[in-house]
């Protein structure tokens, strides 16, 4: 359902056989089965449960072709996932381990569909326990409020003076609040869905890169913001438009004084960003910040950093970069 991809995590894509094996569901020993009635799915229902080790829970929903089955999962255990499949089928239509904790699946035919909640194999082998809440809704495929597409950009409107719009980590008030947004802020539309009677939209806010879910009634269509200009000789990045561009001091040889180097940054909320620095001759260096600190770069050399006031000095090998905190979080 999302119209875009998580931007800064495209910086260093890593996919290993070990990760894939760890994400596979365990072979269930105890399956708790429950049928969710049509009235509950039409209104939207939130179910609570807990599973341990190789156990699983299966929720059966009946629907007709063209309806949209909406499911979202919240748990404090990162190894808990859900799959969606036609009842009796060997293959899943939606696999949470690779597609995330929010699903909107258009049903291909009338029949029964199973939402299976399970622990990935590595967590099950450790006999972990996971408590969860599971939202399930079923609605018609055509919505009057533009759930299937909608504008590319939204503007936050309709808030009382001094109020903030809560940005949640998932499409329901039971998900934690990440931060707030004020009237007038612009957000990229990544798709909307119905959770019970309410329309929720997945968004990415301009400038900060903060991503999350907000109640759709506070959003109106807006024009796209002006993208920052990338000067000639600036970095290319990973194809995601930069949130900001400019210059930072850099040096690539030990003992060399710093010089202005062009940069571009893709932000992902406070403290998280990918920064690309152009080194000349078509070369560029990519640095990843998480939690307000630099954590890795596309260099084989060990990374170190220090911070004085609001300025990071990042080093690896003979290279060093001076990056103001405002580059990472905006402002």
Image (cartoon, grey):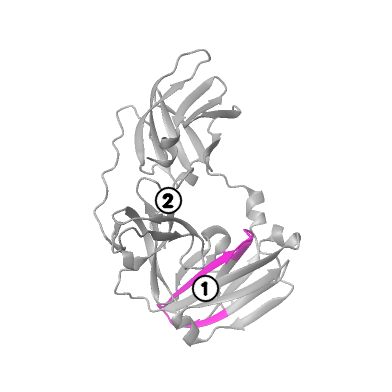
Q: Which residue is mark 1?
A: 135
- Please name whichever residue, 76 or 55, is drawn nearer the observer in this view of the structure: 76
Identify the element where label 2 is drawn.
Answer: loop
Q: Position of residue 253 (x, y in %)?
A: 50, 16
Q: Position of residue 319 (x, y in %)?
A: 52, 22
- Please name whichever residue, 213 or 96, is drawn nearer the observer in this view of the structure: 213
Question: Can I make out residue 148 in this image?
Answer: no
The image quarter in which residue 73 lies = bottom right
The image quarter in which residue 246 lies = top left
User: With 275 as the anchor, is 49 left or right in this view?
Assistant: right
Q: Residue at x 30, y 71 (%)?
A: 145
Q: Do the CB atoms of the residues marked 1 and 2 lie less than 8 Å apart?
A: no
Chief secondary structure of the magenta portion: strand
Question: Can I make out residue 37 in this image?
Answer: yes
* Residue lying furthest top: 255
Q: Does the stretch in magenta take in 270?
A: no
- Please name whichever residue, 298 or 245, is drawn nearer the observer in this view of the structure: 245
Label 1 or label 2, whichever comes before in sequence order = 1
User: With 138 as the anchor, is 132 left or right in this view?
Assistant: right
Dot 1 crowding, Cα within 10 Å, few <14, some 14–19, many 20+: many
Q: Which residue is mark 2?
A: 210
Q: Position of residue 71 (x, y in %)?
A: 50, 71
Q: Nearer the viewer, mark 1 or mark 2?
A: 2
Disc 1 and disc 2: Cα gap in Å? 24 Å
Q: Position of residue 25 (x, y in %)?
A: 66, 64
* Residue lying furthest front: 162
Q: Please give the range of residues in magenta.
A: 60-81
User: With 165 as the anchor, is 136 left or right in this view?
Assistant: right
Q: Quadrant of the C terminus?
A: top left
- Please name whichever residue, 106 or 39, is drawn nearer the observer in this view of the structure: 39
Q: Quadrant of the N terminus?
A: bottom left
Dot 2 crowding, Cα within 10 Å, few <14, some 14–19, many 20+: many
């Amino acid at each position: 359902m999302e119209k875009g991809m998580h931007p800064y995590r495209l910086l260093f894509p890593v996919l290993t056989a070990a990760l894939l094996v760890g994400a596979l569901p365990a072979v269930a020993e105890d399956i708790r089965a429950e049928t969710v009635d049509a009235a509950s799915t039409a209104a939207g229902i939130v179910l609570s449960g807990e599973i341990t080790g190789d156990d699983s829970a299966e929720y059966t929903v009946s629907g007709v072709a063209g309806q949209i089955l909406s499911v979202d999962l919240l748990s404090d255990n990162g190894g808990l996932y859900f799959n969606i499949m036609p009842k009796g089928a060997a293959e899943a239509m939606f696999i949470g381990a690779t597609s995330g904790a929010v699903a909107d699946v258009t049903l291909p035919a009338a029949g029964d569909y199973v939402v299976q909640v399970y622990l990935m194999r590595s967590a099950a082998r450790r006999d972990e326990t996971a408590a969860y809440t599971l939202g399930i809704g079923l609605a018609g495929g055509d919505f009057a409020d533009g759930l299937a597409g909608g504008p590319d950009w939204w503007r936050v409107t309709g808030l009382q003076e001094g109020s903030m719009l809560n940005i949640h980590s998932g499409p329901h008030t039971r998900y934690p609040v990440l931060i707030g947004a004020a009237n007038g802020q612009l957000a990229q539309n990544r798709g909307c869905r119905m959770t019970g009677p309410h329309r929720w939209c997945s968004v990415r806010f301009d400038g900060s890169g903060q991503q999350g879910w907000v109640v759709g009634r506070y959003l109106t269509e807006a024009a796209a913001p002006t993208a920052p200009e990338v000067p000639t000789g600036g970095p290319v990045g990973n194809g995601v438009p930069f949130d900001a561009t400019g210059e930072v001091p850099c040096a690539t040889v030990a003992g060399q004084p710093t010089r202005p180097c062009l940069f571009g940054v893709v932000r992902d909320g406070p403290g998280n960003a990918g920064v690309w620095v152009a080194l000349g001759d078509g070369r560029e260096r990519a640095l990843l910040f998480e939690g307000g600190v630099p954590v890795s770069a596309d260099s084989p050399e060990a990374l170190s950093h220090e911070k004085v006031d609001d300025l990071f000095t990042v080093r690896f090998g003979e290279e060093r970069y001076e990056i103001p905190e405002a580059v990472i979080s905006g402002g």
